[in-house]
Amino acid sequence: MLIEVEDLSRDFTVRRRAGRLRRTTEVVRAVRDLSFTVERGEMVGYIGPNGAGKSTTIKMLTGILVPTSGRLSVAGIDPSRNRVDLTRRIGVVFGQRTTLWWDLPLRDSFDLLRRIYRVDTARHRRNLAEFTELLDLGGLLDTPVRQLSLGQRMRGDIAAALLHDPEILYLDEPTIGLDVVSKGRLREFLRRVNAEREVTLLLTTHDLQDIEQLCRRVMVIDHGSLVYDGSLAGLHEQGASTRTLVVDLVDEAPAIDVPGAVVVKVEGPRQWLCFPAGASAAPVVAAVAAAYDVADLSIQEPDIEAVIREIYQRV
Amino acid sequence: MARLAWDARAFTILAAMWVRVGWSYRTSFVVLTLSTLVISGVDFVAIVVMFANVDALGGFGLGQIGFLYGATAVCLGLADLAVGNVQRLGRRVRLGTFDAMMVRPVGVFAQMCADEFAFRRVGRIAQGAAVLAWSLSVVDVDWGPARLAMLVSMLVCGAAIFLGLFVLGATFQFVSGDASEVANAFTYGGNTMTQYPLTIYPTEVVKALTFLVPVAFVNWYPALFILDVPDPFGLPDWLRFAAPVAALLLCTLAALAWRTGVRHYRSTGS
């Protein structure tokens, strides 16, 4: 096991004003009795609403935060006790902030990282050449980080996190704020890193597409507890979530009647049909197209927040 | 021990990079260094002007005060150059750059000190050293190995005392967010007080500067030995040799506080 987490908890003491001078302190449990394991080579999506404890977990896994209780082992190392030893074996990308030096060109940042991670020059050159090509950084190496766009900076950050060949890469909201094309390229790169370099990936995200395209396994956390750990398909089943087929008919018609889907809304020639998210859209589309004159079709993916909300209500 | 040596090496790697970045804006670097030199020089000029009207201050002549002034300025300058950047802790925590430092293979303390390392701060050291050198040329000292050793020890221990104060002050920011002013009160404030002979203060203040915030050990007690002056407050003579003890205690306390601070670090919301 690469990552082992057992009964992990983390409390925060929050001071609140209660009246003019009085202050009350309250203990908030951000992470509660969390247990899971991750094997080498996995790609795991770690999701949950804001404030659920995702970042707190990642920060404990990297050694930034010390757990209140529980056991934690990453690559055989206790992160909070041997944080500095662990840093050589992990890479961390915080989506919202850069770990690069703001005033330095990317090339200098990378060179500095090479020296403080003590990567030998040949290996560094090989890795840098590969990441420069795959992440399309060629034209950006001499630009100071502060002048890069969000997407460019994110690519730089990811390259920086991988230059020392870590075994695990943590990504906290890696695609936040990126356009569709950038997101797609980034996912492609991450898939490659996982397959070719056998880097284990743990990513937090709000974007269901990230999970769908990258992760076979999803962990859902809410109020500090793990509420789901399994495949994405299983998550949809659990949440009984649905995808929606939006059909634009040539003419107005009564509610479409096809097996496997239910009409939930009709608006002139446009109709909305729901079907289970775990099922394929193909037979539904085929059935509709066979029985009606269709002008246009589109599929709406279930909103991950909605799926998760559904799960919370059951717990 | 290996960890310490590596941190020191990583510090030089990172600091050298910042010196290079600073040097790439040569004009600005030169202007800033000179202005630091001038600004810190002005307050000694004020003392010189004062001595146009008086012959002694608190029983000390201009040369002796120059010695006190130069010594504390060099010590503060050295400490500020090495670890002054730890004062940015509060801001780093807020911006999340402290988190980034924690996932790099170098101790956070070394990274904090090296980050945005400002070599222009040598201006202050140069100014203090100039005043110290001048004072040594005018005061009447019977130099022997003991006094020379004390001179070296004074600069080393004095820098260590300010260093401890800088770090303790920064550690306070783990608890209270951005509170660099609290630290400044002790470091720069302590420097301002020890620029003058302590005889101008009441005994209680001198005792506080000895046993509470031990900046009196930066220059006052070593100076009493080097200049061969009996303690005006009648405090025991062994105090003039106690600067290494004070420095060691303060730095140990600072190191423990820093470790505790990092261990109890709460990070930010996201």
Image (cartoon, coloured by chain):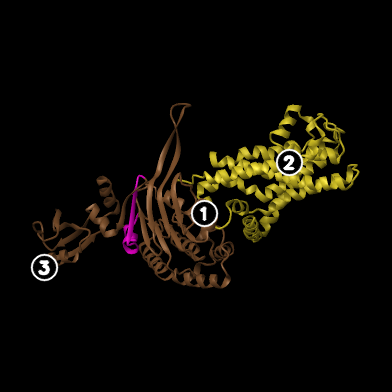
Helix or strand or loop: what does disc 2 sit on? helix
Judging by the rendered image, the residue that carries numbered circle 1 is B100
Q: Which residue does the image show at 34% across and 54% down from the upper left?
A: A219
Q: Is residue B93 above or below residue B202?
A: below
Query: Which is nearer the eye, A98 or B113?
Result: B113
Chain A tint in image: brown
Mark 3 belongs to which subunit?
A
Mark pair 2, 1: CA separation: 36 Å
Q: Is residue A257 left or right of residue B224?
A: left
The amino acid marked with disc number 2 is Val
Residue occupying the point 27% across, 55% down: A235
Specify the chain shown as yellow. Answer: B
**Element class at badge 3:** helix
Which region shows up in magenta? Answer: A206-223
What whole-number distance in Å separates the C-alpha atoms at marks 3 and 2?
A: 92 Å
Tell me the amino acid under the disc marked 3.
Ala
Name the residue nearer the viewer: A147 or A262.
A262
Residue B245 is tagged as 2
Is residue B48 visible in this depiction of the protein?
no
- In the image, is B7 to the left or to the right of B158? left
Quadrant hosting residue B49: top right
Circle 2/circle 1 CB separation < 8 Å? no
Q: Position of residue A76 (x, y in %)?
A: 47, 58
According to the picture, the residue beneath numbered tag 3 turns out to be A290
Within the magenta stretch, is there residue B166?
A: no
Residue count near mark 3 (Cα–Cα under 10 Å), binned few <14, some 14–19, many ≥20: few
Quarter of the view holding residue B68: top right
Q: Is residue A212 magenta?
A: yes
